[in-house]
Structure formats: structure tokens, C-alpha cells
Image (spheres, helix red, strand yellow):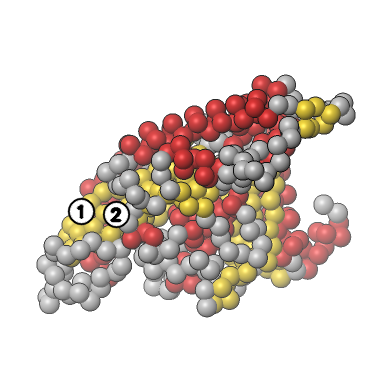
Amino acid sequence: MGRRNLQRIRQAIDISTQNTAAVIDFGTSKIVTIVAEDHGFEQCDIIGSGTVPYDGFSGGQWNAPDKVEAAIRDSINAAELESKTRIKEIYVGVPSEYIRVLATTTEVGVSSADRTVVEADRWALMDAAADKLDLPSHQGTVIHRSAAWFQLDNGKPTYNRIDGQRGEKLSGQIAFIIADPGFIEEASRLLNGLGISVLGFLSPTMGEAILLTSYKERDRALALIDVGYTSTEFSVVQGEAIVYHCILPLGGGHLTAALATELGIPMRAAEQIKRSYIFMPDEFDPVSDPEVIDESGRRLTFPTSLVKTIVEKEVDDLCEMLELTFKECSASLGNNSLVILTGGGLSMMRGGREYVAQKLGRPIKGALAKTAKLNSQKYASALGLVDLVLDSITQRTPQEESFPGRLAGGFRGLFKK
């Protein structure tokens, strides 16, 4: 970065107002930094962003650890230049590979003399759930705790707060998201080395779930499938909680790699073919065989039937993994539960969502955050992180524990849904 650009950053205003925040999201193939402002009335503006490709992570380790710091710095610098701000503090999204979800049902007695439910009863329920799960034994950092549903006596379960209602017994399903302390330590080290303080660690998965779904949709449990570049994240969401979570070791990058291997072409050319592939084309779609230019400048043409075989084999493998996952969490999901597909690994391929829906025998809905910038499914987790951060800042009061702290309930959402 040139000396003039550095001067511009130093002269720019610092991010210090309560309604402005910076976040950084570590995806499977890119690092995204976003600076956003909350203008109230459920409106949020992205005033700067920086997206930098990197090699991601696997098995709890960076794939190219010597390049991560530079990628973080470049992503932050780009966001600073566009937003004309200097980032001194930031919220960090914990990648899906570094989180675990624990959920349990429990109950407590209503504490007030007149048996009216108050906020303290809900927190007592969460504390009881933490004790039941023996959270300290899991050796991680709790970054979220929230409720899938509450139930008063034998009433109907609801994810809405039930403060003010009367009863004897409060029960509910409470979920905790636990972050790997190794990631927290490493991310803090890298960001502190750049002169940036970390204000909190959050789960982009949680933010994405709240951002892409409505209260009504979360009244019953739904499945959120985020197909990334190197893996696929599967979450069951209900109320304001993630009650089931797993990582499947197959993503959009595997499609690209399979094409590159089978066709004998570079990854860049294989990615071009993958992006142009159409699942289940109709009579209005072009039928010409895909072409790419190789590294020596030659034009290479491949039969559509061969490309179809390669691509659909990989997607079929993913669908088999998804079928097994649906069976594993069948206690939480029904056959008619809503399924949402997002992420840049598959949903951006034309007809990909419909193909997966047909294979799984389930209706699948696409979801897209309605924003003026970064309006793409590949930014869903980063935008969810922004939504979660700004909404939590807006609702926090000086009496509350430090962020991220008590994030259960009341997510109003800053992007339009």
C-alpha cells in the first residue's frame, strides 16, 4: 500500500461510535472485513468492505499459516480505504469448523411470589441448562447461549419471551455455541499484531440463521445448509438457537478439483466450467459444449455429457451425506421442515438448488440478504455476522455483562427480511 493511502487512513475518522462496527469473517476460501453503520429503524449501511482470497483451514489448522496474516491485513486495509475509517477494534466471526453446539432441555420453578415469569427466570433456566451439560468440562469458550423454545407448565412451547405470564414451572430447550480456544487465541494474536483489539467472538452461523430466516419460519425447526468451498455446514435452527450442527467434508471446491483432475485442466479453467454449468437445462438453455482456454492459449472443448457426469457425481455424493445427516437429526426435523440452501459453493450454480431438492425429495428454499452491497449468497455468513453484532450492540445496556454475553432473545435484525 502506498504512502498516500496510509496517510488517508490516518487522517480518516476512527470507528468509535456505538452504531458503527467492524467485523471480520473467516470463510473457507476468503476473508471478508466489513464496516457497517446502524441508522435505526431496522436499517444498516455497509460503508466499507474488503474481500481477500486465502487457502482457508482444515483439521483445525490454517492450510497456509504463513499467508494468513497478510490476507487479514489486506482485507482490513481494503475495508478501511473504502469506508474512510481506521479500524482499531473489531468483532471476529468464529468459523464453523471451530465451533460446537450443545443443546438440552431443562426446567426451573418460577421464582416470584405471585408466580409471574420475569427475566431472571429465563436466565435461571439457561444457568440450569449449563449445569446440566457441565459446560466447563467441554474445554471451550461459550460465545452464545439462546433458547429454541420456552414452555410454561403444560402450555404450548413458544420461542417468544413469556415474561409477565403466570405459572409454576418454566421449561425450555437451551443451546450453547462453544468456540475452540485455540482459534480465539490465534485470531487475537494475529489481529493484536496489526494493532487491532478484538471486542468479541461470535458465530457467523448464528447470525446467518437469524438474518436469512423470519420469526415465523423459526417457529418450527428448519435446516440451514451452507455449501462453502471446502466443506458444507449443516445446522438445525429453532427459535433463536442452533440446536444441531455438523460439518460435511465436501464443498464447491471439490467440484472444481474433480473437473480439473478428470479433464486435465488447471483449477482456474475448471472453476470457469463449473460456474457455467446448468443443472437440468430446459429448451431455452444453450446446448453447446463448454470451452476454456488453457495456459498455452489453446481452446479446449469438452463434451457436455462428460462434464455432467463429473459434476453430478460430486453433488450426488454431497446429497448422500445430507440424507444421512437428516436421518441423524430426525428428532428435531420433520419431513416437511423448511430447508434453506445458501453459500457460494453450490447455490450460485444455476439449477443447483433444484437439483439437490430433487435428490433429497425435499423442497428447498434459496435465501439472500437484501443489501445494497455484497448482495450475493457467498457473503451470507459475513452479512449475518454484521447483523448479529449491530443488533446486539443496539440492544445492550450498561448493566448487561460484557459482549458477546447474553445474546438470547430479541434479535430484531438490521437488514430487511
Nearer to me, 130 or 278: 278
Can I make out residue 15 in this image? yes
On screen, residue 157 versus residue 406, left or right, reads left
Classify mark 2: helix, strand or loop: strand
Residue 285, horizontal then vertical, whole percent: 68, 43
Q: Please state which amino acid type lies under the numbered disc 1.
A: Thr
Nearer to me, 9 or 189: 9
Q: Please state which amino acid type lies under the numbered disc 2.
A: Ile
Instruction: Determine whether 378 is above or below 20 in the image.
Output: above
Residue under numbered circle 2: 174
Count of residue discs? 2
Can I make out residue 183 in this image? no
Residue under numbered circle 1: 106
Residue 81, horizontal then vertical, whole percent: 76, 61
- How many C-alpha atoms fall within 10 Å of the one at disc 2: few (<14), some, or many (≥20)? many
What residue is shown at x 71% (from left), y 70% (from top)?
Answer: 13
What residue is shown at x 84% (from left), y 29% (from top)?
Answer: 299
On screen, residue 29 versus residue 111, left or right, reads right
Residue 213, horizontal then vertical, whole percent: 45, 59
Q: In which quarter of the view is residue 196 placed?
A: bottom right
Nearer to me, 191 or 28: 28
Q: In which quarter of the view is residue 84 placed?
A: bottom right
What residue is shown at x 49% (from left), y 60% (from top)?
Answer: 211
